[in-house]
Image (cartoon, rainbow, N blue to C red):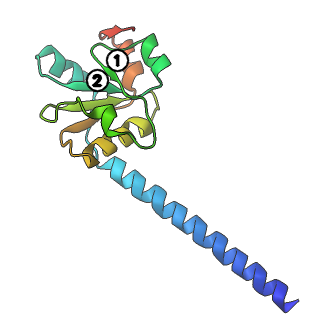
Amino acid sequence: MEKDRSVNVVKLLVLLSAVVTSLLIVSECAAMQADIPRISIQELKKMMDQGVEVTIIDVQPKDIYDMGHIKGAISIPWKSQIALEDVWSLPSNIPIVTYCACGPGESDSADIANQLIQMGYDDVKVLKDPSIQGWKEAGYPTEKK
């Protein structure tokens, strides 16, 4: 009986430890994503209208990108770890803006932006929600592949 109680206490401690660790990881990821600058659709449109060279990355799945994306955007679909071959051709001296259709928090585009920053790109921003939907609703230029 005492042994069963000890086993249950150990299981509870292991479970509690796993929950606390998960919460710390999620908290750290959210903090890292919160530090990434955001840009509005109006600010991005203004940059484009002024001829500012900017790399725009659509992180949605390729089939969604193909149905319509911000004019000039390239497709780098979200994955948990992008590889150098995914970004080797991106110039490091011009701004990069990532976007998705994830809604509040822009989690996929923020994750890709964070990965780019960790790879050495320093002028990386995330397009604020409503992101691509807001872009389309505003009548800003899109294209299909």
Toward the viewer: 14 or 105?
Answer: 14
Residue 127 can be seen, yes or no: no
Q: Is residue 46 left or right of residue 9?
A: left
Is the residue under label 1 in contact with that under label 2 (CB below 8 Å)? yes
Q: Give the residue number, with chain letter if any, for mark 2.
A: 41
Residue 28's x, y, as percent?
A: 40, 58
Which of the numbered marks, if any, corresponds to residue 135?
1
Residue 132: image quadrant is top left
Residue 133 can be seen, yes or no: yes
Residue 18's x, y, as percent?
A: 59, 67
**Screen quadrant of the C terminus:** top left
Residue density around tag 2, few if under 14, some if 14–19, many if 20 or more, within 10 Å = many
User: Mark 2 or 1 closer to N-term?
Assistant: 2
Residue density around tag 1, few if under 14, some if 14–19, many if 20 or more, within 10 Å = many
* CA gap, disc 2 and disc 1: 6 Å
Q: Which amino acid type is shown beneath numbered disc 2? A: Ile
Toward the viewer: 134 or 93?
Answer: 93
Write the residue at 39% across / 8% down. Answer: 144
Q: Residue furthest front?
A: 85
Write the residue at 30% across / 11% down. Answer: 140
Check disc 2 and report its element: helix, strand or loop.
helix
Q: Residue furthest right?
A: 1
Residue 41's x, y, as percent?
A: 29, 23
